[in-house]
Amino acid sequence: MIKYTFLLFFLILLGCSKRSELIIKKLDSLSGIEQPNQIANNIEVVFVDSNFTKAILKSKQARIYNKTNTTYLDSSVSVEFLSKISQKRMSILTSDSAKIDDITKDMTAMGNVIVNSDSSGIRLETNILQWNNSRQKIYSNEFVRITTKNEFISGYGFESNPDLSNYKILKVSGIQTKR
């Protein structure tokens, strides 16, 4: 009798637990808002390839969604791109926020995006900039402004390596020489 009472009690608990999970899932789906699986504050992620550090990403907050394999960086995003040879910083990207595809490691930086090249002194400004991890390129279809030692160049569409030493603007709309 005691065995059956324990088994019945266990089944009731299991049934309540399953019912509670179903109710919670139903409420989440009705609200239409997916909740993040993880939230982290003051993060720093180091990207390593073989034996060298490629980049260091920092943000004040990250929200990770396992279902969509997406991470959102909510504020004060910075990415330092490092040289494979010297391991020194080549350039730094800053933005208000970013979205990362956790599978491909591609990133879209949004809001006040600035890339400063340490070696060439070139500065890129735009509202949206994308990082293609497999190609190791940054690009944008938006308006961009490039500041070099000698000129300001503006236009639409942009592609470059991370240190801005080999960039192209697809549709130049203006060039102004510095005085």
Image (cartoon, rainbow, N blue to C red):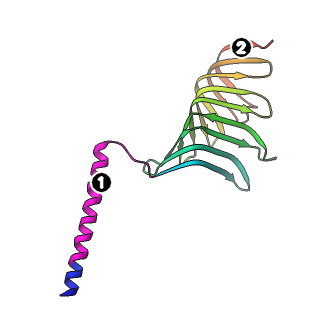
- The residue positioned 23% from the left and 73% from the top of the image is 11
Specify whether residue 23 is painted magenta. yes
The span shown in magenta is: 8-37
Left or right of 86 in this view: 21:
left
Image quadrant where residue 135 sits: top right
Q: Which residue is mark 2?
A: 175
At label 1, the amino acid type is Ile
Under mark 2, the amino acid is Ile
Viewer-proximal residue among 61 and 177? 61
Residue at (20, 81) in percent of width and height: 5
- Residue for point 78% across, 47% down: 87
Direction from residue 3 to residue 88 in the image, left or right: right
Provide residue 9's location: percent of width, then percent of height: 22, 76
- Looking at the rendered structure, the number of numbered marks drawn on it comes to 2
Residue at image position (71%, 28%) is 167
Task: Say the numbered circle drawn on residue 24.
Answer: 1
Q: Which image quarter holds the N terminus?
A: bottom left
Is residue 1 rendered to the left or right of residue 111? left
Q: What is the x, y in percent for residue 162?
A: 70, 36
